[in-house]
Image (spheres, rainbow, N blue to C red):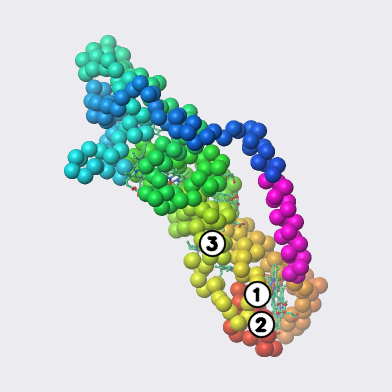
C-alpha cells in the first residue's frame, strides 16, 4: 500500500463515518428523547413530602435488611464518617431517598405481632426512589452527586464515554449490595464485562490469546470503562502505547524500521485473541504476502525453492526475517531486511 492510496482510504473512511453518524444521530433523537439534566435530577430527589430519618430509624424496627447493612457498613462507602460527629457520610437514604413515608407506622411491636401471625412486614418501599426503573442517566446521577469528576478523578470523561452514551449506568458494573467490596477487583473484571461483551469472550477462547482468563492480564490494563478521550476506551493515547506499556522491547526507534507499520500494532495483531499464533490477524506467510512479493529462498541444504513450489508456503517468513518489528543491525547486503 502506498501513502497516497492510504490517504484516500482514510478520507473515504472519514466521509463514510461522518455520513453514518449523521444518520445515527437522527436515529437516536427519534427513538429516545434525551431529557434535560434537571428532569433527571427531579427523578432522583425522591418524594418531596418525605423526610430523611437516618439509617438507624430506617432499619431499627425490622431486621429484613441487616445483611445489606452489615456489608454496606464494611465497605469504603459505609465506613466514611463525618469528622468529629461520627455520623455516616453515606447512608441508605443517600441513594434511596428520604425514608419517613416508607417506615410510617412500622414499630417493633407491629413487626413482632405480624411475625407471630406468620406475616412478613414490608416497608412502603414504593415511596422510595424506584432505582431499578430509572433511566440510566438518572441512575448514574445518584452516584455522581457525590462522585464528581473532582472527587473521583477516573470519572472525568464519564459523560462523553461510550458506556454513558449507550445507557450503561454505574450499578450495571458496581454491585452495591453484593458484599463489602464496591470496587470491581481486577480478577473479577473479565466476567463482569463479558455479561455484555460476549463477542470479546469468544476471542479469549481462541487458541492464542492474552492471558486474561488466566488472570494475568486484565481488561483494565488496557481499558478505562469510565470513559476516555481515546477511541475504544483505551487508557493510553494510542493502540501502540497500549501495547508497548508491556512489550517495551517492540517500541524502537530502530535504525531499520518496518516502514511505518509498527505505528499500529493492530496492522498485524489482534488485541484479545486469534486463531493464529502470536495473535496474528492472518497466518504467515499470507500476512506478509498481503503486502509483499514472494522471493526464492535457499534452504539449509543450499537448494533453491522457487516461490511457486508448494513447500515454500510452509515456510514462515520470520524464520529468516526474525527481527520483524525493526532492528539496528543491517542485513548482509547492507540493507534493513530484518533478518538479524
Ligand atoms: C450508594 C448507593 C446506595 C446506598 C448507600 C444504598 N443502596 Fe440499596 N440499592 C442501591 C442500588 C443501586 C440498588 C439496586 C437497584 C437495582 O436493582 O437496579 C439497591 C437496591 C436495594 C434493595 C433492593 C434489593 C436488592 O438487593 O436488590 C434494598 C432492599 C436496598 N437497596 C437496601 C438498602 C439499605 C438497607 C441501605 C443502607 C444500609 C442501602 N440500600 C444503601 C444503591 C444504594
Ligand atoms: C452520599 C455520597 C455518595 C453517594 C451517593 C455514592 N457514593 Fe460511592 N463513595 C462515597 C464516599 C465518601 C466513598 C469513599 C471515599 C472514596 O473512595 O471516594 C465512596 C466510595 C465508593 C467506591 C469505592 C472506592 C474505593 O476506592 O474502594 C465505589 C466503587 C463507589 N463509591 C461507587 C458508588 C456508586 C456506584 C454509587 C451509586 C450507586 C455511589 N458510589 C454513590 C460517597 C458516595
Ligand atoms: C462498565 C463498567 C463500569 C461502569 C459503568 C462504572 N464503573 Fe466504576 N469501576 C469499574 C471497574 C472495572 C473499576 C476498577 C478499576 C480498576 O481496577 O482500574 C471501577 C472503579 C471505580 C471506583 C474506584 C476508584 C477508581 O477510580 O478506580 C469508583 C469510585 C467508581 N468506579 C465509581 C463509578 C461511578 C460513580 C460510576 C458511574 C458514574 C461507575 N463507576 C461506572 C467499572 C465500571
Ligand atoms: C492488551 C490490551 C487489551 C486488553 C487486556 C483488553 N483489550 Fe479490549 N481492546 C484493546 C484494543 C487495542 C482495542 C482496539 C482494537 C482496534 O483498534 O482494532 C480493543 C477493543 C475492544 C472493544 C471494541 C472493539 C471490538 O472488537 O468490539 C471492546 C468491546 C473491548 N476491547 C472489550 C474488552 C474486554 C471486555 C476486555 C477484558 C475481558 C478487554 N477488552 C481486554 C486492547 C485490550
Ligand atoms: C451493562 C452492559 C455492559 C457492561 C457490563 C460493560 N459494557 Fe462495555 N459497552 C456496552 C455497550 C452497550 C457499549 C456500546 C456499544 C458497543 O460498542 O457494543 C460498550 C462499549 C464498550 C467499548 C467500546 C467499543 C468500541 O467499539 O469502541 C469498550 C472498549 C468496552 N465497552 C469495554 C468494556 C469493559 C472493559 C467492561 C468491563 C469493565 C465493559 N465494557 C462492561 C455495555 C457494557
Ligand atoms: C498488561 C500487559 C500487556 C499489554 C498491555 C499487552 N500485552 Fe501482549 N502479552 C502480555 C502477556 C503477559 C503475554 C503472554 C506472554 C506469555 O505467555 O509468555 C503477552 C503475549 C503477547 C503476544 C504473543 C502471544 C503468544 O502466542 O505468545 C503477542 C503477539 C502480544 N502479546 C501482542 C500484544 C499487542 C499487539 C498488544 C497491544 C494491543 C499487547 N500485546 C498488549 C502482556 C501484555
Ligand atoms: C508487520 C506486521 C507486524 C506488526 C506491525 C507488529 N508485529 Fe508483532 N509480530 C509479528 C509477527 C509476524 C510475529 C511472529 C514472530 C515470530 O514468529 O518470530 C510477531 C510477534 C510479536 C510478539 C510475540 C513474540 C515476540 O517477539 O515477543 C509480540 C509481543 C509482538 N509481536 C508485539 C508487537 C507490538 C507491541 C507491535 C506494535 C508496536 C507489533 N507487534 C507490531 C508481526 C507484526
Ligand atoms: C501492511 C503491509 C505489510 C505487511 C503485512 C508486511 N509488510 Fe513488510 N514492509 C511493508 C512496507 C510498507 C515496508 C517498507 C518498504 C520500503 O521502505 O520500501 C516493508 C518492508 C519490509 C522488508 C524490507 C524490505 C525493503 O525493501 O527494505 C522486509 C524484509 C519485510 N517488509 C518483510 C515482511 C515480512 C516477513 C512480513 C510478514 C511477517 C511483512 N513484511 C509484513 C509492508 C508490509
Ligand atoms: C530462508 C530465509 C528467508 C525466507 C524464508 C524469506 N526470506 Fe525474504 N529475504 C531473505 C534474504 C536473505 C533477503 C535479502 C537480504 C539482504 O538483502 O541482505 C530477503 C529479502 C527480502 C525482501 C526485500 C526485497 C527483496 O526482494 O530483496 C523482502 C520484501 C522479503 N525478503 C520478504 C519475504 C517474505 C514476504 C517472505 C515469506 C513469504 C520471505 N521474505 C521469506 C531471506 C528469507
Chain-order first, disc 2 or disc 1: 1
The alpha-carbon separation of the residues under discs 3 and 1 comes to: 22 Å
The residue to which callout 3 is attached is 237
Q: Is residue 143 above or below residue 274?
A: above
Q: Is residue 85 above or below residue 103?
A: below
In percent of the image, x 34 and y 44: which residue is there?
A: 181
Does mark 1 have its CB less than 8 Å from ligand 7? yes
In percent of the image, x 63 and y 37: which residue is there?
A: 28
Q: Secondary structure at mark 1?
A: loop
The alpha-carbon separation of the residues under discs 2 and 1 comes to: 9 Å
Q: Is residue 8 above or below residue 40?
A: below
The residue to which callout 1 is attached is 258
- Residue 113, quarter of the rendered image: top left
The residue to which callout 2 is attached is 336
Which numbered mark, 3 or 1, is in the foreground of this view?
Answer: 3
- Residue 45, quarter of the rendered image: top left
Does mark 3 have its CB less than 8 Å from ligand 4? no
Specify whether residue 280 is in view.
no
Q: Nearer the viewer, residue 23 or 339?
A: 23
In percent of the image, x 40 and y 21: which residue is there?
A: 126
Residue 81 is situated, as x and y percent measured from the top left of the image, at 24, 42
Amino acid at each position: 500500500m502506498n501513502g497516497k492510496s492510504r490517504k484516500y482510504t482514510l478520507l473515504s473512511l472519514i466521509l463514510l463515518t461522518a455520513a453514518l453518524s449523521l444518520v445515527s444521530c437522527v436515529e437516536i433523537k427519534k427513538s429516545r428523547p434525551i431529557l434535560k439534566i434537571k428532569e433527571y435530577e427531579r427523578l432522583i430527589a425522591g418524594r418531596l413530602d418525605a423526610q430523611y430519618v437516618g439509617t438507624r430509624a430506617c432499619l431499627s424496627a425490622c431486621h429484613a435488611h441487616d445483611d445489606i447493612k452489615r456489608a454496606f457498613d464494611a465497605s469504603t462507602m459505609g465506613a466514611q464518617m463525618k469528622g468529629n460527629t461520627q455520623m455516616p457520610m453515606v447512608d441508605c437514604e443517600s441513594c434511596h431517598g428520604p425514608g419517613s413515608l416508607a417506615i410510617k407506622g412500622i414499630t417493633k411491636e407491629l413487626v413482632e405481632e405480624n411475625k407471630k401471625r406468620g406475616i412478613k412486614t414490608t416497608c412502603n418501599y414504593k415511596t422510595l426512589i424506584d432505582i431499578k426503573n430509572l433511566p440510566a442517566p438518572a441512575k448514574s446521577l445518584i452516584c455522581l452527586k457525590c462522585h464528581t469528576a473532582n472527587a473521583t478523578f477516573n470519572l472525568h470523561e464519564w459523560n462523553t464515554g461510550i458506556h454513558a452514551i449507550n445507557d450503561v449506568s454505574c450499578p450495571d458494573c458496581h454491585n452495591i449490595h453484593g458484599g463489602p467490596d464496591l470496587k470491581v477487583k481486577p480478577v473479577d473484571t473479565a466476567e463482569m464485562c463479558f455479561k455484555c461483551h460476549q463477542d470479546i469472550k469468544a476471542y479469549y477462547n481462541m487458541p492464542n490469546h492474552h492471558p486474561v482468563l488466566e488472570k494475568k492480564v486484565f481488561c483494565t490494563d488496557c481499558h478505562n470503562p469510565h470513559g476516555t478521550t481515546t477511541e475504544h476506551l483505551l487508557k493510553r493515547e494510542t493502540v501502540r502505547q497500549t501495547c508497548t506499556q508491556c512489550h517495551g522491547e517492540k517500541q524502537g526507534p530502530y535504525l531499520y524500521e518496518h516502514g511505518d507499520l509498527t505505528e499500529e500494532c493492530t496492522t498485524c495483531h489482534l488485541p484479545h485473541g486469534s486463531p493464529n499464533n502470536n495473535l496474528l490477524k492472518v497466518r504467515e506467510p499470507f500476512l506478509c504476502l498481503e503486502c509483499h512479493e514472494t522471493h526464492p529462498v535457499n534452504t539449509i541444504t543450499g537448494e533453491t525453492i522457487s516461490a511457486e513450489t508448494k513447500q515454500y508456503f510452509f515456510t514462515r517468513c520470520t524464520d529468516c526475517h526474525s527481527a520483524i518489528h525493526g532492528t539496528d543491525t543491517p542485513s548482509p547486503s547492507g540493507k534493513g531486511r530484518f533478518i538479524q
